[in-house]
Image (tube, coloured by chain):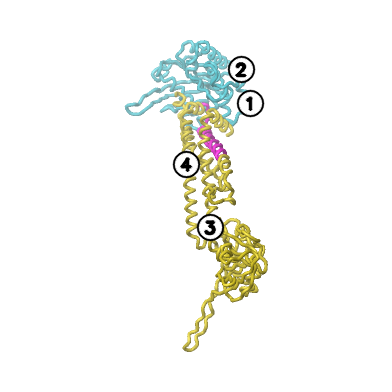
Amino acid sequence: MTALLAVRDLVKTFGTGDTETRVLRHLNLELQAGEMAALLGPSGSGKSTLLTILGTLMQPTSGSHTMLGVDLVAAGDRALTTFRNLHIGFVFQFHNLLPDFTALENVIFPTAVREGRETANARARGRELLVRMGLADRVDFPSANLSGGQKQRVAVARALMNRPELVLADEPTGNLDRASALQVMELIGEINREEGTTFLISTHDEKIAAFCRRQIVVGDGVVTG
Amino acid sequence: MLYALKIATRYLTASKAQTALLVLGVAVGVFIFIFMSALIGGLAQFILSRTVGDIAHVTIQAEAADPALLLPADGVLLVTQKSNLRAAELRNTDGFLPLIAALPGVRAISPQINGSGFLTRGAQAVQISINGIEPGLESAIINLDGYLVAGSARLAAGSVLLGQTLADDMDLRLGQTVRMTSTTGIDTVLTVTGLYQIGSGGPDRRTAYISLGTARTLFAMPQGVTRIEIKLDDINTADAMALRIAALTGLDAKSWTDGAEQLMQALSAQAQTGYFLKTFALITIVIGVASALLLSTYRRRPEIGIMRAMGAGRGFVVFVFVTQGALVGLLGGLSGAALGYLALLPFPSRDAFRAGTLPIDITQGSYGLAILLTVIGAILASILPARSAARVDPVTAIGQ
């Protein structure tokens, strides 16, 4: 496997002076293409901050961050937006779908926003992903009317829409019942195996972490294991 | 940016009641704008038609020549007075009348011989103003046909049109004869063929209309005229047209606005009032749209965060919210314009203004301008909320 992304000496602080809080302390991490890794650690250990930086939604205070050979610390907002759209997918704990859109419209959003319109190809790809997620009968359902598990599967499909190299999932099953959680994780595992998409999944749940071949433990702002 | 348009439309249709209220608010603003435009425009039209509607918009008059200087003889001063018995004469009008008539915006042109004189009947004598006009052009400047109360407005040799009040003063009836004497001392007997009532004391009591041919005899003017009166399609172009005619012909052309400064000031003040009211209506629209979109931006912060995380640029977010503003402006503008037009329909047309009615001119509603300004105003109003939306931090917003 080759390194998909690497962070070196990553530091992230919030606030200044007396209120300064250092969340990441010279953290180093490398992810290989095709990996499926769990990000473990107690609350406040810096997992979410790390995911946010890896997702280019936040810049580190210092350190380096490269992915696919691109220096993402030096990149501007426009370049990061494009990079994020093409190469990174997100799955959030609370699905975060657009409530006024259907399941299919949510899934194809990343492609449509890049191309400026909803193309037939995008619709076909979105439909295919929803079928794969077991939501063939929910394609044109308003997303607000879906169950929690269905919404999370739509969110996974959306994350995969642009065939990103990396999917970052922050507690993707944290808001689901056990059956739905296992179903979502099985789908993620299947996609990882079949398409080689790299997954980094932040979780507190050991059973969810067990789906991943690698466990990365973060504690006090550094990788401890 | 078709996709941004789709999202903007979806956001608007997702909250139908809220959008309907917003559009209604904008429509009311546009309605006020249109109503005020029609009212102010109609009022100005009404005032103009009542004050200067029956006068020439541009008048060409010959400049009175100063008397010839008489050389003083030894010890004697010779003086000659300027005559007011006879107006100065415009000669060779045949050359420039077609030129003026062909100018775009000229509705009618009326060469005239004007002067003073007396009407006598039996022991009665009344001093009058005599207007000699071309037969067929009786209503070119003042609408004599419209003011006619008896007989015909058509002039012929030997006929005269008199004001009803003058006829009453002299106990004259249609078909009776009267003697007219000009200030040159020439007199003729004329038959009263028409009586008019303008509703204004001076013209009704002191003016007589005769044919140009009769006037030539009375004022001993076998050729030329004393004045040329010109009516324009648009009274507001009179100043420019007077300058153009003066440049074209070398004659002294004067606009009706010369000497009407007070009226012009009053109309200008009225127009200014209208501008203020319309500006306030636009400001209301802008504030309404801006506040509604700011609320929408705040409510949709998590969604904006998601869009940004999924790769939507700041420009895309700005476009979504500006498009919403433009759509609200367009819908509100169209609805307000339609409402305004429907509300103005029952009012009498500009040609049918009567005392006691509200002089609203439906043709001066400025519908296109109202829609255009509303859309522009709504777009401007949406820029602040749109920029605020584009600055949303995805991390914070998603965490909400």
Q: Amino acid at mark 4?
A: Ile
Q: Which mark is residue B51?
A: 3
The answer for how far apart the CA atoms under marks 3 and 4 are is 34 Å
Residue A206 in view of the camera:
yes
- Numbered disc in front, either 4 or 2: 4
Q: Which amino acid type corresponds to the residue marked 3 in the rendered image?
A: Thr
Numbered disc 4: secondary structure:
helix
Q: Which residues are magenta?
A: B309-336
Q: How many marks?
A: 4
The numbered mark 1 sits on a residue in which chain? A
Where residue B389 sits: x, y (%)? 47, 32
Same subunit under labels 3 and 4?
yes
Q: Are marks 1 and 2 on the same chain?
A: yes
Does B322 appear in magenta?
yes
Local crowd at mark 3 within 10 Å, few (<14), some, or many (≥20)? few
**Where residue A70 is drawn, which disc sits there?**
none
Disc 1 secondary structure class: helix
Tell me which chain appears yellow: B
Amino acid of disc 2 = Asp
Q: Give the residue number, with chain letter if any, for mark 2.
A: A137
Give the CA separation, mark 4 to mark 1: 45 Å
The 10 Å Cα crowd at callout 1, few under 14, some 14 to 19, many 20 or more, is few
Provide the residue designation for mark 4.
Answer: B283
The front one of B326 and B174 is B174
The chain coloured cyan in the image: A
- Give the structural element (helix, strand or loop) at label 3: helix
For mark 2, give the secondary structure.
Answer: helix
Res. B87 in view: no
What type is the residue that disc 1 sits on?
Asn
